[in-house]
Amino acid sequence: MLYPQTNDARMVFSLDGVWNFRTAGENDYPAEWTAEALPEPIPMAVPGSYNDQNDMTDLYDVYGWVVYQRTFSLPERVIDGQRVVLRFDAATHAADVYLNGECIGSHKGGFLPFEFDVTDRIKPGDNLLAVAIDNRINQSTLPIGNEGNVAFFGSDNAGIPSVEAGKRWAKPQNRPNFDFFNFAGLNRHVEIYTTPRTYIADVAVTTKAVTEGLHDGETGPAVIGYEVTLGGASADESGDRVSVTIRDEQGATVATATGTKGEIDLPAAHLWNPGAAYLYTAHVALAGQAKGSDDEYDQTFGVRTVEVKDQKFLINGRPFYFKGFGKHEDSYFHGRGTDQLLNVKDVSLIHWLNANSFRTSHYPYAENMYDLCDREGIVIIDETPAVGMSWPQYTNKPLFEHHQQVIRDMIARDKNHPSVVMWSLANEPWYDQGGEKSENALRYFTPLYELAHAEDPQNRPVTIVCCQNDYTKDLVTRTMDVVCLNRYYGWYNLSGDLDAACYALNYELDWWEKIGKPVMFTEYGADTMEGVHGTHGKMWSEEYQRDYFARIDAEIDKRPWFIGEQLWNFADFVTIQGTMRVEGNRKGILTRDRQPKMAAHFLRDRWAAIPDFGYKG
Ligand code: E9O
């Protein structure tokens, strides 16, 4: 699905702004709220999670439906004869959409875009747009919510009569089986855009071949492939009206082609490399059959290859070393709301830290962040929202189908980003119980692994992010292209004892060595309260977090097939309240307001000395 664009043929109208808002019921919402002006609404900014925007009601506690509303009108002379599309960059987690009182569709899943053709539904003057959104998570949503009174991360004394009696008074609430706050609502942009009636529906660009051994700044021959998909009434007859012009960063034309599919030679291509990005633009044009019906779309792309070979992760044929973290879309007031300023700030901090990569833990991020990483040369592991899974999910067919859909949609959305180098199918599915349960997990994830490869025109590596587990009974992780480990030796395990932690880590790494795959950390870390100090560096102090990384990193440095370190987490972030969390998870090397803890300085120095390529030979 192409991101909306304003150009000579298309026009985007933003529907961001302050909408009207009401909380509704647990299971439904009043029908009249979708067709008439909301009674006594409160203001709600879009994009933004609703949870932290109002101090009169505790919107952190919402469980169920809310309704957003706004009106808009469109200039007749601009939309006349055009196809008009209503697009949501995301709505978290499920949405019913009403235009002028009529339900135009629904969507499940909170982190990927969806859109509706509203060409025949727009009327002159004010149009009423109402969006009902459900924030409930359960065993059949991604991410997973616990059902019943299951507590996440302790705070339970199951079985004690008084505690069990008290649970009956617990109000209905989301019980995430994951460790980040369930921020909800219209977290991302909403827009209306126009295209001609026959239009460019999709563009995919791939790098077929690059000259071996090209380094930063050098140019050499490359071959790219492209495929354009058309939509609309005359799509089938319009293929030979398509032309593609490849422009370099200065806007100069370097190659052209015609038709919906083909290969293009770039005799002096600049490669896209981590830390040395170079972006081309494929200007796709569709000559219309009638006056005023031309379409066009500019798709940026990078010339770069990705491949796993000989226990190495090769970008443009060179062994890459991942330095970075898992992140979250999380900030004060916005919740998970798209915030371009924050994205720019975070990218500047990634550079400041001398990092080169991050994982979109634990869901696909807003598209703007990928655009920024494309241009800034930052590498992304792109993750689905499949977090909190366990053995009941592995035999849940509707969930499997939803998981397939999410993988398809994520790859369809992000396939052209040079920054994206690997897909993550899930975070920390629990699958080391052995026997039938482990086997069901393998039966569940193998087809998803194959699907991700099949869906991606660039055939990037595919992984799954594995929780600290009994790796000997984990049948899935070892089948992936890269083994991604979340390990907390010295924090959740062998707490506070870094000698024991290093011993245990090496004990496990000896086992992975025999598997013969490239291995990396996608999480490791220690909760740290800024301002807590101690000469002996005990847990929670800034010294402990620094020492933890220094000690663990010294161990992984000894393993040539250990291809990267993505720690947990870039910054502190909010979770549900609980005994293990102080206003959230404190494993950030930055505070939630993006100030460095002591470990950030250590890592900044360490990463300055580690090159993007060839660190392990
Ligand atoms: C997922 C991430 O979202 N991994 C968690 C992170 C954390 O800080 C969380 O924020 O807790 C770690 C999972 C660790 C499991 C350790 C198992 C050993 C328990 C004794």
Image (cartoon, rainbow, N blue to C red):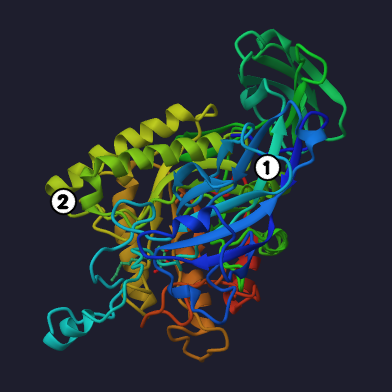
Label 2 residue near ligand 1, CB within 8 Å: no
Is 459 left, or right, of 448 in this rendering? right
The numbered dot on residue 192 is 1
Count of numbered badges drawn on the protein: 2
Q: Which residue is mark 2?
A: 434
**Element carrying mark 1:** strand
Is residue 306 depicted above or below 500 in this figure?
above
* Closest to the observer, 147 or 216: 147
- Residue 50 on image: x %, y %: 55, 67
Horizontal and vertical percent for residue 422? 50, 41
Q: Tell which circle, 2 or 1, labels the residue nearer the N-terminal end.
A: 1
In the image, is 391 to the left or to the right of 207? Answer: left
- Give amino acid for label 1: Ile
| Residue 482 makes an appearance in the image | no
Label pair 2/1, CB-CB below 8 angstroms: no
Q: Position of residue 85 (x, y in %)?
A: 64, 36
Within 10 Å of disc 1 (Cα), the crowding (few <14, some 14-19, many 20+) is many
**Disc 2 to disc 1, C-alpha distance:** 50 Å
Foreground: 93 or 28?
28
Q: State which quadrant residue 345 falls in.
A: bottom right
Residue type highlighted by circle 2 = Gly
Q: Secondary structure at mark 2?
A: loop
> Quarter of the picture for ligand 1?
bottom left
Q: Quadrant of residue 539?
A: bottom left
Residue 319 as seen in the image, left or right of residue 13: left
Rendered position, 101 above or below 203 = below
Counting from the top left corner in percent of width and height, residue 359 is at 52, 53
* Residue name at image x 28 percent, y 55 percent: 139
